[in-house]
Image: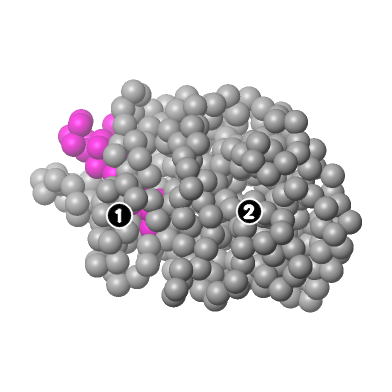
């Protein structure tokens, strides 16, 4: 039986092989399933940085010209309601993919749309609550102009203040991070003497900040709670000799559970590459589509109804789709970022229950989207 899958993929500086990584994960999930009776046809379209009408045009092409059975698409939050509207109108299934730096709004809920993310906002809230309980009640926030405007910044603060914490100082780096010395950030840390510093930097700017912190007098003296993309193992390859760097995320490639260990080892065996979060997203989306095909022998239009009260055994644990049709798992991992002989690892210290996840949406319903229009932050 033929099934046509439309895939809209952006370019990325942070993950330069994003398109291939996503497809590798997706195809590996299909390969591991029992889909021999289905002939899967991939129709792939580039969508630039996934923040303008290129996404909308490509989606309409998939529906009207290619007549796909399901569409998979990255999309910036500012145009997500337009994309959802198209699939509402045509009553066709869509899986929207994102890292989860912004919270979904009520207008993004549709019976035809699933939102598959890594829930960065929810992780940031848990990081705030954990930091207040573990490190102390006085914090400083240090953020990149690129990373700092998404909802996860607000989510850090919400979580921290919910436990009696206070953020006493904010540092925002200028756009030209290559010329920035970060002296003001370091002066702020010395002046405020916080119990913890929240760090929101990614990619090459994150590497620069780590190098500055490693060579400062604060290394090992003040804990830093950073966004998971700052502590990404595939981007950080140099040993900064950092101490006390933590993050909370919905994934950990060093997770000792069999499903994650098997996923990591099989990906390396198949592609001779270390797994990354883009490949993980592709794999889980492949698992979602596989469950549709095995359970219903097709990909139903009302994809929301299909996944009510169902779980997928993903590498991150039992995955389900909540009331806003966003993927979620029961717990997030507290991770410590450490160099282990040859490479960086995010060692899992403990798991934190995520049962309050759906309640968080209501805290953000009136918080507008701000910052960059591309999906966080990968494009």
Q: Which mark is residue 226?
A: 2
Q: Quadrant of the N terminus?
A: top left
Q: Which mark is residue 89?
A: none
Q: Is residue 358 left or right of residue 268?
A: right
| 331 or 136: nearer the viewer | 136
| 314 or 102: nearer the viewer | 314
Residue 107 occupies quadrant:
top right
Q: Which residue is mark 1?
A: 261
Q: Secondary structure at mark 2?
A: strand
x, y percent for residue 355:
49, 27
**Mainly helix, strand or loop, the magenta region?**
helix
Q: Is residue 313 left or right of residue 92?
A: left
Q: Is residue 258 magenta?
A: no
Please determine whether, in this image, residue 170 is positioned above or below residue 317.
below
Q: Identify the residue at image location x=44%, y=73%.
A: 341
x, y percent for residue 37:
10, 45
Q: Is residue 284 magenta?
A: yes
Q: Secondary structure at mark 1?
A: helix
Range drawn in magenta: 279-300
């Amino acid at each position: 039986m033929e099934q046509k899958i439309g895939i809209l993929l952006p370019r990325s500086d942070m993950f330069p092989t994003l398109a291939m990584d996503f497809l590798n994960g997706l195809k590996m999930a299909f390969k591991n399933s029992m889909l021999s009776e289905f002939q899967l046809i991939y129709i792939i379209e580039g969508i630039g940085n996934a923040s303008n009408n290129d996404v909308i045009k490509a989606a309409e092409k998939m529906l009207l010209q290619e007549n796909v059975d399901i569409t998979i698409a990255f999309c910036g939050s500012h145009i997500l309601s337009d994309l959802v509207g198209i699939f509402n109108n045509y009553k066709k299934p869509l899986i929207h993919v994102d890292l989860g730096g912004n919270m979904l709004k009520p207008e993004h809920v549709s019976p035809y749309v699933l939102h598959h993310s890594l829930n960065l906002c929810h992780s940031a809230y848990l990081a705030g609550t954990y930091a207040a309980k573990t490190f102390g009640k006085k914090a400083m926030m240090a953020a990149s102009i690129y990373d700092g405007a998404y909802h996860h910044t607000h989510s850090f603060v919400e979580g921290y203040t919910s436990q009696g914490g206070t953020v006493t100082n904010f540092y925002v780096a200028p756009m030209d991070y290559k010329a920035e010395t970060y002296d003001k950030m370091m002066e702020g840390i010395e002046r405020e003497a916080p119990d913890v510093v929240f760090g929101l930097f990614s990619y090459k700017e994150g590497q620069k900040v780590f190098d500055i912190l490693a060579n400062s007098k604060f290394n090992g003296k003040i804990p830093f709670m950073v966004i998971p993309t700052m502590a990404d193992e595939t981007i950080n390859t140099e040993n900064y000799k950092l101490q006390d760097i933590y993050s909370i995320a919905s994934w950990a490639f060093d997770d000792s559970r069999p499903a994650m260990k098997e996923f990591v080892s099989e990906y390396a065996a198949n592609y001779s590459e270390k797994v990354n979060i883009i490949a993980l997203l592709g794999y889980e989306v492949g698992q979602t589509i596989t469950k549709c095909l095995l359970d219903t022998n097709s990909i139903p239009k009302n994809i929301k109804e299909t996944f009510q009260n169902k779980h997928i055994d993903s590498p991150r644990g039992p995955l389900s789709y909540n009331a806003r049709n966003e993927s979620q798992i029961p717990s997030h991992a507290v991770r410590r970022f450490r160099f282990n002989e040859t490479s960086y690892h995010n060692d899992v210290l403990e798991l934190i229950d995520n049962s309050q996840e759906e309640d968080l949406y209501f805290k953000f319903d009136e918080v507008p989207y701000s910052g960059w229009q591309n999906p966080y932050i990968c494009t």
